[in-house]
């Protein structure tokens, strides 16, 4: 990182990175996990506040996708699980309180949390949208079947930020275990001119979804394990790739000339989908 020079009989390190312009230092810390980015504040006074302007907030305190971390957390009793979830929410609240940047390239929250924390989660989403977020990821992991608390539901009132830069800046949405309706998703599609990727996993309140019209920018659509879903319609749109996993639904694909990849994994062993209509595709993958 530095260059050595001889001074007063000793070798000292010349810190050339710290002399870089602020925007470059911010770009550097934006490549780091938030815990690592915050740790740079102890390097020197120059670095003390740089992390507060990071353009990436990957708020994953525990890597649930490594080893058996996911299984071990799910095996905890309700009280210790709630305590750890509460600590996570407090930690995220603290990070957002210190953030000073004007823009966010990515906001990702990943932990076992449900509707009991809705006030904080509402604030996180509003915060990200006001920061003109480009990638919005909410991954609220599955609970045990005997848990009585419901999933967090995306508040449609937040979509009242119409005309705000956040709506215009969104390029990617990833929702897991988030209660979201077709109406909310269709509002995003109609009001986010840069939205090209939409992924929805385990949304219990999703019953139907329509992706209709050439003005919609969406190119990649993934819908998986939504138990109440009845139908999906994709018509006259610019979708390039569509993936679905779940129960039998009414699926209509019509006048989608750019669609070259369809990946369907069905829970039930049927040879077709009700109402399924396909344009000629250069690539078609269907797994039974």
Image: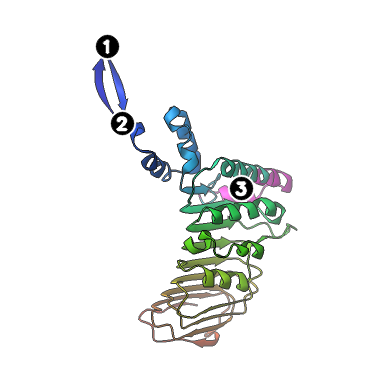
Q: Residue at x 48, y 81 (%)?
A: 213
* Nearer the observer, 14 or 223: 14
Above or below, comparing residue 222 to residue 111 in the picture:
below
**What span is in magenta?**
66-85
* Callouts 2 and 1 close, C-beta under 8 Å: no
Q: Residue at x 37, y 79 (%)?
A: 283
Residue lying at the far left of the rendered structure: 6
Q: Residues within 10 Å of mark 3 (few under 14, many from 20)?
A: few
User: How far across and how far down the image is residue 114, in percent?
Assistant: 68, 55
Q: Residue at x 38, y 79 (%)?
A: 258
Closer to the chain start, of discs 2 and 1, is 1
Label 1, secondary structure: give it.
loop
Q: Which residue is mark 3?
A: 72
Q: Which residue is mark 2?
A: 16
Closer to the chain start, of discs 2 and 3, is 2
Figure quadrant of residue 27: top left
* Nearer the observer, 224 or 135: 135
Per the image, is 206 magenta? no
Label 2, secondary structure: give it.
loop
90 relative position to 282: left or right: right
Q: Which residue is mark 1?
A: 8
Spatial CA span between label 2 and label 3: 44 Å
């Amino acid at each position: 990182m530095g260059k050595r020079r001889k001074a007063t009989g000793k070798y000292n390190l010349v810190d050339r990175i710290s002399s870089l312009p602020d925007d470059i230092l911010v770009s550097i810390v934006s490549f780091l996990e938030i815990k690592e980015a915050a740790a740079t504040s102890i390097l020197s006074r120059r670095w003390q506040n740089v992390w507060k302007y990071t353009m990436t907030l990957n708020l994953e305190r525990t890597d649930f996708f490594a080893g058996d971390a996911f299984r071990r957390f799910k095996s905890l009793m309700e009280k210790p699980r709630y305590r750890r979830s509460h600590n996570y929410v407090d930690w995220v609240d603290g990070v957002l309180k210190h953030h000073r940047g004007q823009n966010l390239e990515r906001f990702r929250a990943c932990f076992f949390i449900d509707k009991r924390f809705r006030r904080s989660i509402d604030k996180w989403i509003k915060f990200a949208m006001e920061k003109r977020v480009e990638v919005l990821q909410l991954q609220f992991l599955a609970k045990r079947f005997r848990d009585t608390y419901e999933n967090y539901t995306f508040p449609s009132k937040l979509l009242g930020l119409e005309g705000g830069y956040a709506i215009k800046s969104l390029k990617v949405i990833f929702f897991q275990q988030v209660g979201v309706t077709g109406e909310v998703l269709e509002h995003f599609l109609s009001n986010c001119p840069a939205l090209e990727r939409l992924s929805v996993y385990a949304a219990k309140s999703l019953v139907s979804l329509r992706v209709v019209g050439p003005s919609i920018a969406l190119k990649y659509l993934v819908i998986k394990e939504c138990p109440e879903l009845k139908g999906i319609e994709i018509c006259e749109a610019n979708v390039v790739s569509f993936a679905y996993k779940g129960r039998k639904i009414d699926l209509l694909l019509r006048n989608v000339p750019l669609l070259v990849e369809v990946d369907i994994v069905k829970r039930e062993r049927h040879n077709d989908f009700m109402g399924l209509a396909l344009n000629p595709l250069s690539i078609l993958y269907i797994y039974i």
